[in-house]
Amino acid sequence: MDEKDRILLHLLEENCRTPVSELAVLAEMSEEDVRERIGRLEAAGAIRRYGAVVDWERAGDGNVAAVIELKVSPERDFGYDRIAERIARFPQVRSLRLMTGAYDLQLLVTGPSMHEIARFVSEQIAPMDRIRETATHIIMKTYKENGTTFAGREDVERLPYSF
Amino acid sequence: MSSGSPTPSEVRRVRDFVSKRARAIPPSGIRKFFDIAQTMEDVISLGVGEPDFVTPWCVCEASIYSIEQGSTAYTSNRGTPQLRDAISRYLDTRFGTRYDPETEIIVTCGVSEAADIAIRAVTDPGDEILVAEPCYVSYSPCVTLAGGTPVPVLCRAEDEFRLTADALAESITPKTKALIANFPNNPTGGVMEEADWRGIADLLVDHDLLLISDEVYAELTYDGDHFSPARIPELYERTITLNGFSKAFAMTGWRIGYLCAPAEITSAALKIHQYVALCAPVMGQVAAYEALRNGGAEKDAMVREYRLRRNLFVDGLNKLGLTCHVPKGAFYAFPSVASTGLSDVEFAEGLLREQHVAVVPGSALGPSGAGHVRCAYAVSRDDLKEALSRMAVYLESLK
């Protein structure tokens, strides 16, 4: 990956709907070059998928989200990978990470209600082999997601002209 | 009569107090535009000479903390030792210029003050001070206030707005004392590379001229590295380097700049600085120190963003037929409006009235700016696109 790739990735991360013609102007390269590079980055898995950052609360969807911490006994030969793979398959699990510190796996789970999330954890996750302990934290409010601040700040007024 | 409005004769008498020098300073060339823009709700302003970014949060946070700790007093006239140290190291590593923090650096209230005290420190009545134009509007008035005579040296579109030896040589007379130059340039975005400086270094030396180099846009250099003329050994002793935090770190409101020069010049400038400003604001100095320590990554991100905007905007201008050289520095595009048949002032006024897009007529920034308009691309890419489509509508209406 070179500097041009990096510029393209930043631009796509910021707005994946930017037309190729505009990407070409911004990144100082031909449209053909843009297409070729994006294709390569997709094939290499550097670009996983294209999506939108949604403020579900603002969208009027009452989904509840929770961070769930799991303490897990690792497996010989596989460590945490196999159990993580099984947990990742649940569609309720939006993200899953292995952490250093007081617990091992961190899940971000969404569901239509707190009740649903509690049920999912107690019935699907907690009983799995090798899960030693779970702790569920309901998310009360999101201030920033993927680099985007949700609460709008007022624009500071600038003079229309200054030298 | 102890109160009430002054009678006309009293008004006239008050006007008489104004010095000839102050009266000789021309009013701002954009006052009229300012007034028109104030009446509009949806102006997209490309008329602003400052970043649209908010100062990096680590910088604000450091300054807030220092205020909470009670750091609210005067500092040393020269500026805090930490900040001068940091500036000295920064200039060395970033631009390869060496200035002793003890004797060769003064922290000022923005580069505006630095330019003023530099000019006053070296100008005697009758001296001619060359000003590379088009340029920021304050140099010539400062020269006038110092008793000198400002003499424009024109930088032209065909030279990508560089200062050439020919133009410089034409303007030098036996009374010439100094040259003021600002590269990367406001309003043209032009830069001077090493070879360009070397091309005029001999002239400066042969005529024993001083160089005042305002490098406030140094960090905003997009294709290649900024070159500080003080790096040329024979220029170092005759150069006053001015720089500051406003543009690079989005810190215009903090008012922190600095002046660097050999100790003899700095001592003279310091006398003026201590009587007019005492010291730069301590909150700003704390902030500037933090900017140099931890603001680099955010500065780099802003510079990357300016470059993207430049690419987008200059491409759009050229597609509209407003010919524009690719500016290699600062955050201004300086397209020619010749294809419209309008003067720069007519174009800027029409665009503002018809399409609510504010740009600065180039002639407000020196005679050689005529026929061009200054568009600051220090606004979001969405606003730039909107401005371009409004300009397209305006150009269509002229046909």
Image (cartoon, rainbow, N blue to C red):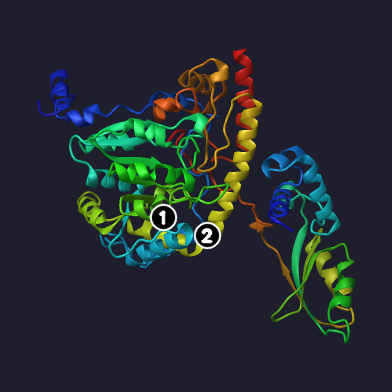
Residue A3, image x, y percentages: 68, 55
> Looking at the figure, which quarter contains the N terminus of chain B?
top left
- B363 lies left or right of A59: left
Instruction: Identify the subunit bearing mark 1.
Output: B
Can the viewer see residue A145 in this picture?
A: yes
Residue projecting furthest to the left:
B1
- B81 lies left or right of B388: left
Instruction: Identify the subunit bearing mark 2.
Output: B
Residue B12, image x, y percentages: 15, 21
Residue B282, image x, y percentages: 33, 59
The crowd level at tag 2 (other Cα within 10 Å; few <14, some 14-19, many 20+) is: some
Q: Which numbered circle lies on residue A40?
A: none
Q: Residue at x 22, y 54 (%)?
A: B274
Can the viewer see residue B210 in this picture?
A: no
Residue type at mark 1?
Arg
- Residue A56, relative to residue B38: is it above or below? below
Q: Residue at x 22, y 39 (%)?
A: B146
Residue projecting furthest to the top:
B399
Residue type at mark 2?
Gly
Foreground residue among A12 and B370: B370
| Cα separation between marks 2 and 1 | 23 Å
Badge 2 is on which residue? B296
Badge 1 is on which residue? B231
- Residue B316, relative to residue B198: is it above or below? above
Residue projecting furthest to the bottom:
A76
Residue B351 occupies quadrant: top right
Residue B142, image x, y percentages: 27, 38
Q: Secondary structure at mark 1?
A: helix
